[in-house]
Amino acid sequence: MENKHQCGGCGSGCGSSDDGSKGCGCNKKNAKTMTIVENGIEILCNVVELIEYEDKKYIALQDKDTDRIYLYNYSEVEDDVVLNPITDNRELRQIGRLLIELIE
């Protein structure tokens, strides 16, 4: 699975390298986004939530076109985000429950 991290330094997705402390001028109109590749198709997603649970990091992504939610384990390597599928069904259910609690 590929991923293309596309958020700017301010975290808004504007592409600015400014850290947002002085304002990059985008007014944070754009949400953080990532492009993932599923079955050979690029899918542009909004970053819904970052979750830390039992010493692991998870990310919830929402397809901008269909609103489908994708959950991944992730790690950060230098300036890139590496997504790993959650293969354990018990772990996936637990992270799904945590996500629901966080967004309600």
Image (cartoon, helix red, strand yellow):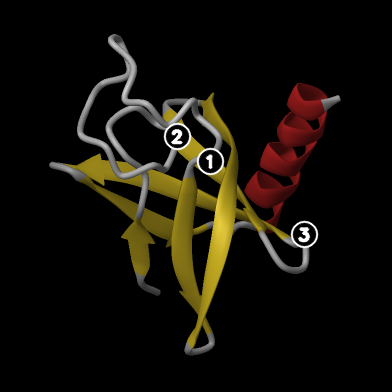
Q: Quadrant of the N terminus?
A: bottom left
Mark 3 or 2: the one toward you: 2
x 53%, y 87%: residue: 39
User: What's the residue at 30%, 44% (across, down)?
Assistant: 15
Q: Is residue 85 left or right of residue 81?
A: right
Label 3, label 2: how many angstroms apart (C-alpha)?
19 Å
Using the image as rendered, state which of residue 88 and residue 23 is in the foreground.
Answer: 23
Residue 85, image x, y percentages: 50, 62
**Residue 61 visible to the viewer:** yes
Q: Amino acid at mark 3?
A: Asp
Circle 3 residue: 67
Work out whether residue 79 or residue 90 is closer to the camera in this orientation and state it: 79
53 left or right, relative to 55: right
Q: Which residue position holds label 2?
A: 12
Q: Earlier in the sequence, mark 1 or mark 2?
A: 2
Give the class, few, some or many, for how many residues have Cα within 10 Å of label 3's Cα (few <14, many ≥20). Answer: few
Q: In the figure, 40 relative to 78: above or below?
A: below
Q: Name the mark nearer the viewer: 3 or 1.
A: 1
Instruction: Please tell me whether mark 1 sits on a helix, a strand or a loop.
Output: loop
**Pointers 1 and 2 in contact (CB under 8 A)?**
yes
**In the rendered image, which residue does mark 1 sit on?**
30
